[in-house]
Structures are given as structure tokens and as C-alpha cells.
Image (tube, rainbow, N blue to C red):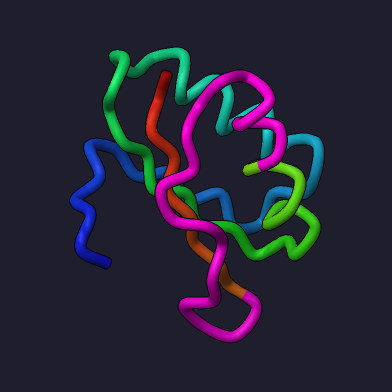
Amino acid sequence: MSITPDHDLDIRGEVCPYTFVRTKLKLETMASGEVLRVVVDHEPATKNVPRSAENEGHEILVWPHPIAEHVWEFVIKRK
């Protein structure tokens, strides 16, 4: 990944809707324009969390992609 995140959020072990709740709470602590890398192991979160973040006005810089078996990462830029 060529983007250097300002923050990392590893929420492996969490399931929806907690994956989005944890992501949303983290984004709220960040400054506008900062970048968050999120790591999940709950496959539905790869769709739900980015979609919900976009609905709140954040930008998905890197869409979910696998980094290990049953582990995905994606990158969000705070609005």
C-alpha cells in the first residue's frame, strides 16, 4: 500500500454492527483529512463498513482487499 495511514484500527474478532461502530468512533477522534487503515476478519464488514463510512461523507481510498486468509484491509479518509 502506497498510502501511509495516520491511524490503524485492527478490529479482528469483531462482527457487524460493532465493526462499523468501532470504525465510526475512531473516525470521530481524527482530524479532517486524516487517513485510517482498518483491518477486519468478518467478511460482511468488508461491504458494510465502507458503505456506511461513505454514507457519512468519508472517502474510501483503498477498497477492501485480502491481506491474509479471512483478513481484509481498507483505508478511509476522514471528511
Q: Position of residue 31 (x, y in %)?
A: 29, 14
Tag count in the figure? 0
Kindly identify the residue that appears in the image at 73 percent across and 61 percent down.
42
Q: Is residue 66 magenta?
A: yes
**At 28% from the left edge and 23% from the top edge, which residue is drawn?**
33
Q: Nearer the viewer, residue 31 or 57?
A: 57
Q: Quadrant of the N terminus?
A: bottom left
Nearer the observer, 59 or 16: 59
Instruction: Give yes or no for residue 3 being in the magenta stretch.
Output: no
Q: Which residues are magenta?
A: 51-70
Question: Is residue 69 rendered to the left or right of residue 32?
Answer: right
Residue 66, image quadrant: bottom right
Q: Residue furthest bottom?
A: 69
In the rendered image, residue 18, in percent from the top left (x then y), is placed at 73, 35
Q: Quadrant of the C terminus?
A: top left
Q: Residue at the location (19% across, 51% down)?
A: 4
Q: From the viewer's perspective, is residue 23 above or below residue 14?
A: above
When the figure is inspected, residue 14 is found, relative to residue 77, above or below; the finding is: below
- At x 38%, y 33%, the residue is 77
Residue 8 x, y percent position in the rendering: 35, 44
**Residue 36 in picture, x, y percent from top left:** 37, 39
